């Protein structure tokens, strides 16, 4: 009888794979870039290399639903993909609105095909894409949306484009009303792909006052345009126009949206609020997926040579007080009371189902690509802060150790990864 000599064996870890209902000690064998076996701990296996992952979590390769990695083309906004991908323990990224129908070929050549991280695109509904993180609102007006060209680009690139990105926020509504959102919704319906919608104010108002737009009416205007499977982003935003109204209550329209089959993505970002999260979760609004939403305005990275100085009118776009990553966003979800199994689903199998990714991702089933994330599972008391200054104390923290992308190991050595602030034990 011939015994297979596997390429790699991960031993001693605690494996969590919600798609298979696994939550316990397992060893994991890798061969030819694929999952070869999921085994009871200590099963005799021959392997060229063994890695002891005791005291760590082994999960399917993490998928970040909200990345901004169209480096250089989107100016200061776009990060280098591998920095927030495999070097942060994340095997797959979904870029949200960086490329447009005009720039998609460059995104394919210089990001999707050039990086170690697997990268997909939610195509911008706007011709300008994610240029400078939307620091120039005039470029995002209705006549800068080409429905036919955007639908064509998506349908011509089904391996790369998995949906669309648009913004339903106060600054845009004050300028142009709902027309941009109506066009974006039509694009998504015609292509039969999900539309990912940013909620919470992004652009400053044009002039003084609210310009006649009540931010608490935006959800009610937008949701009727949408279809089952579309994705509402930023449920925990601290900015007006989100899930929580000015009286501190969750909009009734959110429940109507969920009943329609719409989905909710945390899209953490620098506008994430523990206060708003508590309100939404206590009201029974539990998001389905989780993205980091790191970009060049909230993540400290060197700017490319020749980057112009920011204009004073753009100062509101730059906020980098608290560092975060997809793993630290998972830590925030745990501190808010979500169970580990659900949090792992939010970055693995739920993403595959909701964001239209290939079914071979998001699980460690035998025969599937060996996309694996290994996380330190730390216990203690950790100070967690948001950009409102709210502090939460978590008793469990996750930090990436390394990941495998189709069996190839990548250390979690990204300079942008946040540190953990341990607090003294309460009993000390």
Image (tube, grey):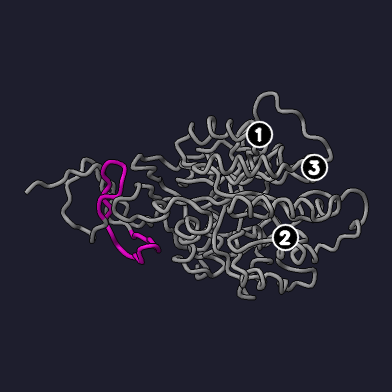
Q: Is residue 82 left or right of residue 97?
A: left
Q: Earlier in the sequence, mark 2 or mark 3?
A: 3
User: Main SS of the magenta segment?
Assistant: strand
In the image as oriented, which residue stretches furthest toward the left?
Answer: 1
Disc marking residue 102: 1
Choose the circle earlier in sequence order: 2 or 1: 1
Residue furthest top in the image: 306
Structural crowding at the residue carrying mark 3, measured as other residues with C-alpha within 10 Å and reported as few (<14), some (14–19) or many (≥20): few
Residue at the outermost right position: 208
Give me the residue at 6% from left, 49% from top.
Answer: 1
Query: How far apart are labels 2 and 1 at the CA level?
Result: 33 Å
Q: Position of residue 379 (x, y in %)?
A: 45, 62
Task: Tell whether position 172 is magenta.
Answer: no
| Mark 2 Cα-neighbour bin, 10 Å: few <14, some 14–19, many ≥20 | many
Residue highlighted by disc 2: 238
Q: Residue at x 71, y 57 (%)?
A: 199
> For the magenta stretch, what is the residue range?
14-37
Q: Secondary structure at mark 3?
A: helix
- Residue 301 location, x and y as percent? 61, 36
Q: CA distance from mark 2 to mark 3?
A: 30 Å
Q: Is any atom of residue 423 visible in this view?
A: no
Picture residue at 50% right of the left edge, 65% below the top: 395
């Amino acid at each position: 009888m011939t015994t297979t000599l596997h390429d790699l064996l991960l031993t001693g870890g605690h494996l969590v794979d919600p798609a298979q209902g696994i939550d316990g000690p397992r060893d994991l064998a890798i061969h030819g870039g694929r999952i070869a076996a999921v085994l009871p701990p200590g099963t005799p296996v021959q392997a060229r290399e063994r890695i002891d992952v005791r005291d760590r979590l082994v999960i399917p390769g993490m998928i970040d639903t909200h990345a901004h990695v169209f480096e250089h083309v989107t100016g200061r906004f776009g990060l280098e993909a591998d920095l927030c991908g495999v070097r942060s323990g994340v095997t797959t990224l979904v870029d949200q609105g960086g490329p447009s129908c005009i720039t998609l070929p460059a995104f394919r050549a210089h990001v999707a095909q050039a990086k170690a991280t697997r990268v997909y695109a939610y195509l911008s509904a706007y011709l300008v894409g994610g240029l400078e993180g939307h620091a120039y609102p005039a470029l995002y007006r209705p006549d800068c949306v080409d429905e036919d060209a955007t639908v064509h680009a998506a349908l011509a690139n089904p391996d790369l484009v998995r949906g669309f990105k648009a913004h339903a926020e106060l600054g845009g509504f004050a300028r142009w009303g709902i027309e941009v959102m109506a066009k974006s919704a039509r694009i998504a319906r015609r292509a039969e792909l999900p539309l990912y919608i940013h909620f919470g104010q992004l652009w400053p108002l044009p002039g003084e006052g609210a310009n006649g737009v009540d931010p608490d009416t935006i959800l009610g205007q937008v949701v009727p345009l949408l279809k089952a499977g579309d994705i509402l982003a930023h449920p925990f935003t601290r900015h007006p126009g989100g899930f929580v109204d000015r009286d501190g209550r969750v909009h009734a329209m959110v429940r109507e949206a969920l009943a329609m089959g719409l989905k909710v993505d945390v899209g953490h970002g620098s506008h994430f609020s523990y206060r708003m999260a508590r309100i939404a979760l206590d009201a029974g609004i539990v998001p389905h997926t989780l993205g980091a939403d790191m970009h060049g305005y909230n993540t400290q990275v060197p700017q490319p040579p020749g980057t112009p100085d920011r204009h004073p009118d753009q100062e509101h776009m730059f906020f980098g007080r608290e560092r975060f990553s997809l793993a630290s966003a998972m830590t925030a979800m745990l501190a808010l009371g979500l169970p580990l199994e659900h949090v792992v689903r939010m970055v693995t199998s739920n993403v595959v189902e909701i964001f239209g990714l290939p079914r071979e991702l998001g699980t460690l089933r035998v025969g599937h690509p060996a996309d694996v994330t290994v996380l330190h599972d730390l216990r203690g008391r950790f100070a967690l802060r948001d950009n409102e200054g709210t502090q939460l104390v978590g008793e469990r923290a996750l930090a990436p150790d390394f990941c495998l992308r189709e069996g190839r190991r990548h250390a979690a050595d990204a300079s942008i990864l946040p540190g953990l602030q341990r607090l003294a034990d309460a009993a000390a």
